[in-house]
C-alpha cells in the first residue's frame, strides 16, 4: 500500500492552555504542526479531494480543539489533536503533532517550548 504525507506547518491560534492561572486568564498564541501519513488508496490517480484528507477540514478540526477546552499540558493538547484527526479521517495511518508555546512561563530566554506527539492507528 502506498502512502503520502500531508504537512500543515505553523498553524497559529490564540488559546488559554497552561498550568498557571495567568496562562488561563491571559491566554497566548500556540503554533501547531501536523504531519499526517495517509494511506493513498486511489487518490493518487483519481485526483479527487473526496479521496484524500482535506487539509482545510483538518485545519478547522485542529482549530476547534486548540481553541476549545482548556488543557494544562501541551502534551495532552497534541495527543487530542492527533487522535481527533485519525478518528475523522480513517485513511490517516500516523499523525505527528507538534505544539509550540512561545510564551512558556520559564525564567530565562528561549524561543519557545515544544512538544511532539506521534499517534499511530
Image (spheres, grey):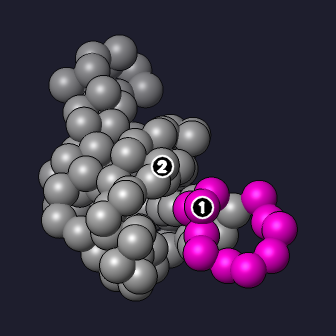
Residue labelled with disc 1: 103
Q: Is residue 114 visible?
A: no
Question: Farthest residue toward the top?
Answer: 47
Residue labelled with disc 2: 29
Badges 1 and 2: C-beta atoms under 8 Å apart? yes
Q: Position of residue 113 (x, y in %)?
A: 65, 70
Secondary structure character of the magenta stretch overall: loop
Within 10 Å of the Cα at label 1, are there few (<14), some (14-19), or many (20+) other Cα atoms? some
Q: Residue at x 69, y 62 (%)?
A: 112
Quick one: 56 or 109, which is closer to the camera? Answer: 109
| Secondary structure under the numbered disc 1 in the rendered image | loop
Bounds of the magenta segment: 101-111
Residue 45 falls in image quadrant: top left
Specify the label residue 7 is tagged with.
Answer: none
Q: Residue at x 29, y 75 (%)?
A: 71
Q: Position of residue 14 (x, y in %)?
A: 38, 46
On whether residue 97 falls in the magenta region, the answer is no
Amino acid at each position: 500500500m502506498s502512502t503520502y504525507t500531508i504537512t500543515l506547518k505553523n498553524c497559529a491560534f490564540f488559546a488559554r492552555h497552561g498550568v498557571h492561572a495567568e496562562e488561563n486568564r491571559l491566554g497566548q498564541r500556540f503554533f501547531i504542526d501536523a504531519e499526517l501519513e495517509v494511506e493513498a488508496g486511489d487518490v493518487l490517480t483519481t485526483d479527487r479531494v473526496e479521496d484524500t484528507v482535506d487539509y482545510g477540514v483538518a485545519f478547522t478540526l485542529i482549530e476547534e480543539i486548540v481553541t476549545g477546552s482548556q488543557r494544562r499540558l501541551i502534551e495532552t493538547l497534541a495527543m487530542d489533536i492527533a487522535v481527533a484527526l485519525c478518528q475523522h479521517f480513517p485513511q490517516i495511518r500516523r499523525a505527528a503533532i507538534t505544539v509550540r508555546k512561545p510564551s512558556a512561563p520559564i525564567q530565562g530566554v528561549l524561543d519557545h517550548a515544544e512538544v511532539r506527539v506521534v499517534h499511530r492507528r
